[in-house]
């Protein structure tokens, strides 16, 4: 009878067969693991893996019924009609504070160069939709020509109006974003400087100009006349219409003018940053 080949070793016997790594196998303590080519240092001797990162500890308090900005925008029940391309839609962190909805819309509407083709005044008449089970508070801004004809000097029953809804984002931030709007007017818009000055509802001091005026009055002690002249020179350099009056400046900054020697430090710094030094002729 032919000789039979030796039966293969069982798995347990193979792992215990004498080999170059046998000594290392014997050195592994109970519970340790040995990998191919491992040295006599056991895996059990290595430092433990770092603990998983702790989750965000911030607690987001969900406001009742507030939708996310994307949900407000996607609400097809309230479409915005023919919205100008550069109209400020949001998101805004506040309603009437600096950089909020009302200042931003007014900045746009009183600029004769806006994409609607002219300037007009606006006003906020507060809440037009109370919070309910489907949405948060809704607030409205209207054209200054709203109202029944004859009810005021400028009233033409203009239907221009925009509505902003209060939202809450997924990270907990609360603010306002545009819900809908009616962007047609039934009256001419202001485009000439004299028209802007004649209409009290469009009179404004641009935000960056207001900062300069405040510094000139409070830090430099400049008179209202000199502040007005300086702002007009800025407007001419920027190619924009003068949209404020001397009376506005006096009302806003007159009390800030200090009876002290005029200090041009801040104004000189501003001018150096605004107008680079000219290259000498022939350079």
Image (cartoon, rainbow, N blue to C red):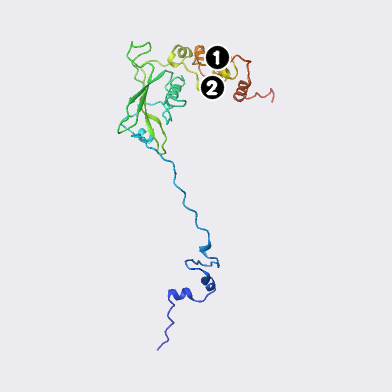
Residue 114 seen anywhere in this rendered image of the structure: no
Name the spot of residue 247 as percent of width and height, x first. Answer: 50, 12
Query: What residue is at 43 percent from the left and 76 percent from the top?
Result: 10
Mark 2 secondary-structure assignment: helix
The residue nearer to you, when weighing 63 against 208, is 63
Q: Residue 79 versus residue 102: which sits nearer the camera? A: 102
Neighbourhood count class around disc 2 (C-alpha, 10 Å): few under 14, some 14–19, many 20 upward: few
Percent x, y of residue 239: 53, 19
Q: Earlier in the sequence, mark 2 or mark 1?
A: 2
Mark 1, secondary structure of its residue: helix
Q: Is residue 177 above or below residue 31?
A: above
Which quadrant holds residue 258? top right
Query: In the figure, is residue 4 to the left or right of 151?
Result: right
Question: Where is residue 32 shown, x and y percent of the image?
Answer: 49, 66
Q: Is residue 142 visible?
A: yes
Residues 151 and 252: in front is: 252
What residue sits right under mark 2 in the picture?
Answer: 211
Which residue carries the number 1 mark? 228
Nearest the eye: 253 or 206: 253
Find the residue positioned furthest to the bottom. 1
The picture places residue 162, in percent across and down from the top left corner, at 37, 24
Q: Quadrant of the C terminus?
A: top right
For label 1, the crowd category at 10 Å Cα-Cα, with few meaning under 14, some 14 to 19 and many 20 or more, is many
């Amino acid at each position: 009878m032919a000789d039979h080949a030796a039966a293969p070793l069982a798995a347990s016997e193979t792992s215990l067969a004498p080999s170059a790594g046998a000594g290392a196998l014997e050195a592994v303590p109970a519970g340790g693991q040995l990998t191919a080519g491992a040295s006599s240092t056991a895996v059990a001797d290595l430092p433990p893996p770092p603990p998983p990162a702790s989750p965000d500890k911030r607690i987001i308090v969900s406001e009742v019924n507030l939708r996310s900005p994307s949900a407000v925008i996607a609400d097809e029940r309230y479409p915005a009609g023919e919205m100008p391309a550069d109209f400020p839609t949001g998101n805004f962190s506040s309603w009437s504070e600096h950089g909020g909805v009302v200042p931003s819309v007014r900045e746009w509407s009183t600029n004769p160069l806006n994409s609607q083709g002219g300037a007009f005044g606006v006003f906020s008449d507060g809440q037009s939709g109370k919070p309910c089970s489907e949405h948060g508070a809704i607030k409205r801004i209207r054209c200054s020509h709203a109202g029944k004809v004859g009810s005021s000097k400028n009233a033409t029953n203009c239907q221009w109006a925009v509505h902003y809804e209060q939202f809450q984002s997924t990270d907990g931030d609360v603010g306002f974003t545009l819900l809908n709007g009616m962007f047609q007017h039934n009256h001419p818009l202001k485009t000439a400087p004299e028209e802007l000055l004649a209409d009290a509802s469009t009179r404004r001091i641009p935000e960056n100009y207001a900062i300069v005026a405040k510094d000139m009055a409070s830090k430099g002690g400049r008179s209202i006349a000199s502040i007005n002249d300086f702002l007009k020179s800025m407007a001419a350099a920027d190619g924009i219409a003068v949209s404020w009056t001397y009376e506005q400046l006096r009302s806003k900054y007159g009390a800030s003018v200090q009876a002290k020697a005029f200090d041009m430090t801040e104004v000189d710094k501003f001018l150096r940053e605004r107008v680079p030094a000219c290259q000498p002729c022939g350079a």
